[in-house]
Image: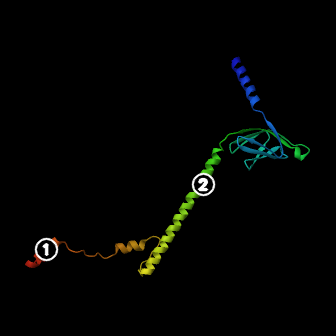
């Protein structure tokens, strides 16, 4: 048991030596794994104000925030007598990939916008087609009412008189035969 604790303590000491906080003064910029991190200022309440990849991020002292794949943990916020000497001591952990939530939201928004545009284009095409049909109906002088439910067209089809079709040859022969013998 003591060996495990000793090994764990050595690992923690080694890990702590690799991860050290950096101190950056106000208006200075660092680059970490392709991300640009600029310290803008330190607020009176001890929060560090950063610009990460062009977007504003505020992190309170002894707190961490993850933004676009960049994890910032503020160890100390130094508010000095001269406003220009304010500084932040922080640890940055940045990966190459942006935050999946932000990426997923951006992708979903793009798909939604594209789908909405396609639907609107389809609606416009249908409206144009309806206008063309109305113009043709007016041009031909057909007395038909076109409405949204199309019930007038359905009623016209249901109430249309049944037109007699031409008799087949067999039917004509039977009728001739009946007429020959006077059978009706």
Q: Relative to residue 78, is residue 55 depicted above or below?
A: below
Q: Residue 178: which quarter of the image?
A: bottom left
Query: Does label 1 or label 2 sit earlier along the sequence?
Result: 2
Q: Relative to residue 19, is residue 83 depicted above or below?
A: below
Q: Are marks 1 and 2 in contact (CB under 8 Å)?
A: no
Q: Residue at x 63, y 48 (%)?
A: 103
Q: Residues within 10 Å of mark 2 (few under 14, many from 20)?
A: few
Q: Residues within 10 Å of mark 1 (few under 14, many from 20)?
A: few
| Nearest the eye: 32 or 68 | 32
SS under mark 1: helix
Q: Residue at x 71, y 17 (%)?
A: 2
Q: In the visual, does 2 lie left or right of 143?
A: right
Residue 83 lies, in percent from the top left, at 89, 47
Q: Which residue is tagged 2?
A: 110
Q: Which residue is tagged 1?
A: 173
User: CA–CA distance between discs 1 and 2?
Assistant: 72 Å
- On-image quarter of the C terminus: bottom left
Residue 99 lies, in percent from the top left, at 66, 44
Task: Tell how many labels.
Answer: 2
| Residue mark closest to the camera, 1 vs 2 | 2
Residue 9 lies, in percent from the top left, at 73, 23
Q: Residue at x 31, y 76 (%)?
A: 161
Residue 123 lies, in percent from the top left, at 52, 66
Q: In the visual, does 148 lie left or right of 86?
A: left
Q: In the visual, does 42 lie left or right of 158?
A: right
Q: Residue at x 47, y 74 (%)?
A: 132
Q: In the visual, does 90 lie left or right of 155?
A: right
- On-image quarter of the N terminus: top right
SS under mark 2: helix
Q: Which mark is residue 153?
A: none
Q: Relative to residue 147, is residue 22 depicted above or below?
A: above
């Amino acid at each position: 048991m003591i060996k495990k604790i000793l090994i764990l303590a050595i690992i923690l000491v080694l890990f702590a030596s690799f991860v050290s906080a950096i101190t950056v003064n106000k208006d200075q910029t660092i680059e970490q794994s392709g991300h640009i991190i600029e310290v803008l200022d330190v607020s009176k309440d001890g929060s560090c104000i950063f610009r990460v990849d062009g977007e504003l991020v505020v992190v309170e002292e002894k707190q961490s925030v993850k933004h676009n794949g960049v994890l910032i943990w503020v160890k100390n916020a130094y508010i000095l007598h001269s406003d220009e000497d304010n500084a932040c001591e922080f640890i940055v952990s940045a990966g190459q990939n942006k935050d999946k939530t932000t990426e997923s939201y951006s992708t979903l928004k793009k798909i939604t916008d594209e789908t909405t545009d396609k639907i609107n284009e389809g609606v416009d095409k249908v409206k144009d087609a309806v206008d063309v049909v109305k113009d043709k109906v007016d041009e031909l002088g057909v007395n038909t009412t076109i409405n949204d439910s199309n019930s007038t067209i359905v009623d016209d089809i249901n109430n249309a008189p049944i037109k007699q079709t031409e008799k087949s040859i067999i039917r004509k022969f039977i009728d001739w035969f009946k007429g020959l013998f006077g059978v009706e």
